[in-house]
Image: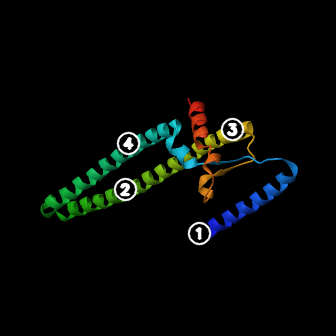
C-alpha cells in the first residue's frame, strides 16, 4: 500500500512539473491511458500464445499423471503383495517406492517452475511487443505522456487509447 501511495505521489509530482513546464513552452499537452492487462488478455497474439502455453501445460500434466500412476501402482503392489514378500524384497520395494515418490515430488516442482518461467517469458515478450506499438503510436499521435490504467485512480474516458493499441497490435502480429 505504501508503494502505491509513493508511486501515485511520484506520478502527481511528475505531472505537476510536466504541466508547469509545458504551460510555459507549449499550448497543450496530450495524455493517454492504456489498459495493458486488457491488451494482454484480448489481443490475438496473446490468445494464440495462451493456447500454445495451455497445450504445454497439458503435456506436462500428462507426464506427471503417468508418473503418479506408476507410484500408485507400486503402492498397490506393496499393499497387496507386501505381507507375502520376504524381508529383502519388501525392503527393496519400499525403497523403490520412496525413490519414486521423491522423483514424483521433484518432477512436480520442476514442471511447476518450468511453467512459471515460460509464463513469465511469454508475458515479457508480449509486453515488449505491446510497448513497441505504444511507443510508435505515441510518437505518431504526438502524445506527451501515456499512463497505464493500473497507476491511476480515476481519469476521463476520452483519453483511453486501449482499443486503438489493441487494433494496432493485432494488425502488427498478423
Picture coordinates of residue 51 (x, y %)? 44, 39
Mark 2 or 1, which is nearer the eye? 1
Mark 2 or 3, which is nearer the eye? 3
Do the residues under discs 4 and 2 have CB atoms within 8 angstroms?
no
Distance CA(mark 1)–CA(mark 4) = 39 Å
Q: Residues within 10 Å of mark 1 (few under 14, many from 20)?
A: few
> Is 74 or 132 nearer to us in this picture?
132
**Mark 2 or mark 1, which has the lower sequence index?**
1
Distance CA(mark 2)–CA(mark 1) = 41 Å
Distance CA(mark 1)–CA(mark 3) = 32 Å
Secondary structure under tag 3 reads helix
Mark 4 or 3, which is nearer the eye? 3
Distance CA(mark 4)–CA(mark 2) = 18 Å
**Mark 1 or mark 3, which has the lower sequence index?**
1
**Mark 4 or mark 3, which has the lower sequence index?**
4
Q: Residues within 10 Å of mark 2 (few under 14, many from 20)?
A: some
Read off the residue under disc 3: 137
Read off the residue under disc 1: 1
Read off the residue under disc 2: 103
Q: Is residue 54 left or right of residue 140?
A: left
Secondary structure under tag 4 reads helix
Amino acid at each position: 500500500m505504501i508503494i502505491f501511495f509513493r508511486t501515485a505521489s511520484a506520478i502527481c509530482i511528475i505531472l505537476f512539473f510536466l504541466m508547469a513546464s509545458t504551460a510555459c513552452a507549449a499550448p497543450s499537452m496530450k495524455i493517454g491511458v492504456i489498459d495493458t492487462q486488457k491488451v494482454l488478455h484480448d489481443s490475438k497474439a496473446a490468445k494464440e500464445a495462451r493456447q500454445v502455453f495451455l497445450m504445454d501445460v497439458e503435456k506436462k500434466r500428462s507426464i506427471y499423471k503417468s508418473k503418479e500412476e506408476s507410484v500408485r501402482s507400486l503402492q498397490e503392489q506393496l499393499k497387496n503383495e507386501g505381507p507375502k514378500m520376504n524381508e529383502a524384497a519388501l525392503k527393496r520395494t519400499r525403497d523403490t517406492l520412496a525413490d519414486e515418490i521423491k522423483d514424483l515430488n521433484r518432477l512436480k516442482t520442476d514442471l511447476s517452475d518450468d511453467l512459471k518461467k515460460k509464463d513469465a517469458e511469454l508475458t515479457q515478450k508480449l509486453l515488449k511487443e505491446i510497448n513497441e506499438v505504444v511507443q510508435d503510436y505515441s510518437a505518431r499521435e504526438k502524445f506527451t505522456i501515456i499512463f497505464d490504467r493500473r497507476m491511476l485512480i480515476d481519469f476521463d474516458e476520452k483519453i483511453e487509447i486501449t482499443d486503438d493499441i489493441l487494433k494496432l497490435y493485432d494488425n502488427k502480429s498478423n
